[in-house]
Image (cartoon, rainbow, N blue to C red):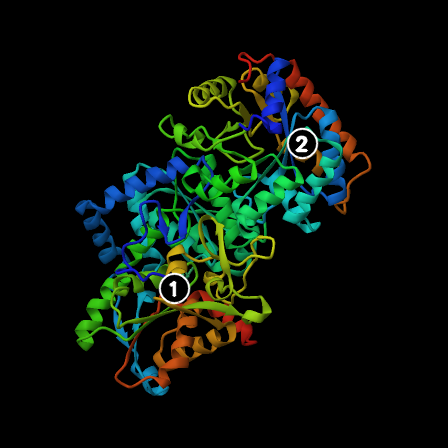
Amino acid sequence: MREGGRIGRRFASLRQQRRAGLVTFVTAGDPDLATSIDIMRRLPAAGADIIELGMPFSDPMADGPIIQAASERALRAGQTMRRTLDMVAAFRQEDAETPIVLMGYFNPVYVYGTARFLFAAKKAGVDGLILVDLPPEEAEEVVGPARNAGIDLIFLVAPTTGDERLPLVVKHASGFVYYVSITGITGTASAALVDVTHAVERIRAHSPLPVAVGFGIKSPGQARAIGSTADAAVVGSAIVAKIADHLDAKGAPRPDLVDVVASFVGSLAEGVHAARPRRGPV
Amino acid sequence: MMDLPNTYRSGPDERGHFGIYGGRYVAETLMPLILELEQAYNAASQDPVFADEFRYYLKHYVGRPSPLYYAQRLSDSLGGAKIYFKRDELLHTGAHKINNTLGQILLARRMGKTRIIAETGAGQHGVATATVCALFGIDCVIYMGATDIERQSPNVFRMKLLGAEVRPVTSGTGTLKDAMNEALRDWVANVGDTYYLIGTVAGPHPYPRMVRDFQSIIGVEAREQIVAAEGRLPDLLVACIGGGSNAIGLFAPFLDDSSVRMVGVEAGGRGIPSGEHCSSLSAGAPGVLHGNRTYLLYDDDGQIRDGHSIAAGLDYPGVGPEHAWLRDSGRVEYVAVSDDAAIEAFQLCSRTEGIIPALEPSHALAYVSHIAGGMAKDEIVVMNLCGRGDKDVFTVARVLGIEL
Ligand SMILES: Cc1ncc(COP(=O)(O)O)c(C=O)c1O
């Protein structure tokens, strides 16, 4: 974790408040650029502690139907990597503190030019990067440029990640460790709490970084349960589903879309905030 | 200048890289599975019992060795080099795909896996997978793009007859790349019992190496056969390139024979300038998709572009990483052949040799018929006739404006 960075500061402040954090995921440019910026602007006040912004990709192999559809909507509306960075820069004009993590697949970053992209992202106000299809075995070419640019490279740990692999996975990690709580794609099953608790403990034995848990958290109650065991709960598909549910027949946003998303995020935040972490985040 | 290696046959390195290509770009959930697969394959590939079993089924079930046939009438009519066909179209299920599905199902059994998943475009790999699953009584789920299901309905029915479940994929553009995405999603959700049987030399390590090794039987046989027939190695090898498995299968055993030229023929579709093609090596650029770095077709923003080819089996926006490396090193040349030229070669082969080829190797044949006339009469070409054309007669009839 970068002590001076927004992600580090945010987790430090959560630790002081003795509460877990809420990480919200939406796809950049979904359903269109203007609505997506509106949603993003409302997230901090609604209770998002960290904003995860999906970079849409034509072939989102680790995502379920809900986030696949979001990616398709965003691309159809003309979203590009450049526009995603512009969204972040616009957001930063008003909010200097809420950490922003970009999440996506390697190809668009690689094609942009990894180092070039990381510098542009930093300049726009991005704090962290998650590349779903970049396991530690292939990460070398991104680790250096991320460090140079001052961006936290966040790695995923899965239920299939055995103890013998954990040291390798957390070796280059910074910001936080993202625990994928199910063996599956986004927006499908939910994990049993005991399993998550056990996994979080396993990760903590190998890394001092905060642990965020995601995949399968759909309701305020689930968010609260995860918040009692992890440093943060990540909610994606459930929020994106609200977006999908509030489009008209032509795919245009209904007038209440942004309010609905903000109020759902509010209820998730209440859930997470009601949780008392069993161990204060590091 | 690139350093030329002393051998072209040592790759990939232990991390699955061919130069900068290949690798294992998969989600963490799959990483331990891929490592397990690699270990299992390493063990199997050194086990004579495994080799014996593979050879047994290749001979008695698949029908290997396939003949190396001197296509005399075609050679005479082109008026140049002697053209030989490596006739993998005579194998069970009608294409080379079964060499690989057989090898992998034997491995899956060894690993104790009870469920097989696969992606398919044209349906040839799906049929070859469903076939070996029926042979060994293993559950089989085939992912196939909804668009492809429509244009390849006979193969869909074949897979069902063989007892496989065919799941239509509607995400993305409903073609091969989307079927592969869906198979990966299935695998992530079923890590315990499921084996993902990839159909070409693409995907994360160890697939490109493993599939190449299983398909290398093509080149091993061809080498022996041509030496027996002509007393020497051929001057030129030609094969079509979808993901590149039939091509690497033929090329691999010859890679260190500097006298042997090799040409891989990609699908030029409606022409490179039209953008409607699948020539990732000729007109794409390096990128990362489906677990490996290789040449891909994508737009300015790194979004994968859909290709087009009259041959469904060539309709993939990427190519195996070993071909990417062979291209950069200059060892193999890659060219593109259009839909129209392939259709013409399809007819030429049917009329002059009495062999109806698949549209995929028709691309290779189009290239051969283009250059053979300019070669000397004592020069020798071996072309991989990797599939038969029964599956394509409807497509060709439609193109020729004939109603069946
Ligand atoms: C007959 C035939 N040839 C070639 C191919 C292309 O695959 P590859 O390049 O892996 O040989 C296919 C794929 O379905 C095929 O069916």
Q: Residue at x 22, y 67 (%)?
A: B223
Report the residue marked by disc 2: A239
Query: In this image, B5 relative to B154: left or right?
Result: left
Chain bearing tag 1 is B
- The spot of residue B58 in percent (x, y) is 25, 56
Q: How many marks are shown on the rendered structure?
A: 2
| Label 1 neighbour load within 10 Å: few <14, some 14-19, many 20+ | few
Residues at marks 1 and 2 on the same chain: no
When the figure is inspected, residue A177 is found, relative to residue A102, above or below; the finding is above
Query: In this image, B336 relative to A35: left or right?
Result: left
Report the residue marked by disc 1: B1
Query: In this image, B73 relative to A61: left or right?
Result: left
Q: Nearer the viewer, residue B238 or B288?
A: B288
Q: Within 8 Å: ligand 1 and the Cβ of disc 2?
A: no
When the figure is inspected, residue B137 is found, relative to residue B301, above or below; the finding is above
Q: What is the three-letter code of the residue carrying label 2?
A: Ile
Q: Secondary structure at mark 2?
A: helix
Question: Quadrant of residue A125 in the image?
Answer: top right
Instruction: Answer whether residue B94 is visible to the viewer in this image.
Output: no
Q: What is the three-letter code of the residue carrying label 1?
A: Met
Question: Quadrant of residue B7 in the image?
Answer: bottom left
Q: Is mark 1 in CB contact (under 8 Å) with mark 2?
A: no
Q: Work out how far the residue at label 1 is from the one at label 2, CA to CA, in angstroms.
A: 52 Å
- The spot of residue B346 in percent (x, y) is 43, 75
- The spot of residue A159 in percent (x, y) is 44, 28
Q: Nearer the viewer, residue B256 or A120?
A: A120
- The spot of residue A180 in percent (x, y) is 51, 29
Q: Residue at x 47, y 35 (%)?
A: B189
Instruction: Answer whether residue B52 is visible to the viewer in this image.
Output: yes
Chain bearing tag 2 is A
| Label 2 neighbour load within 10 Å: few <14, some 14-19, many 20+ | many
In the picture as drawn, the residue positioned furthest to the right comes out as A255
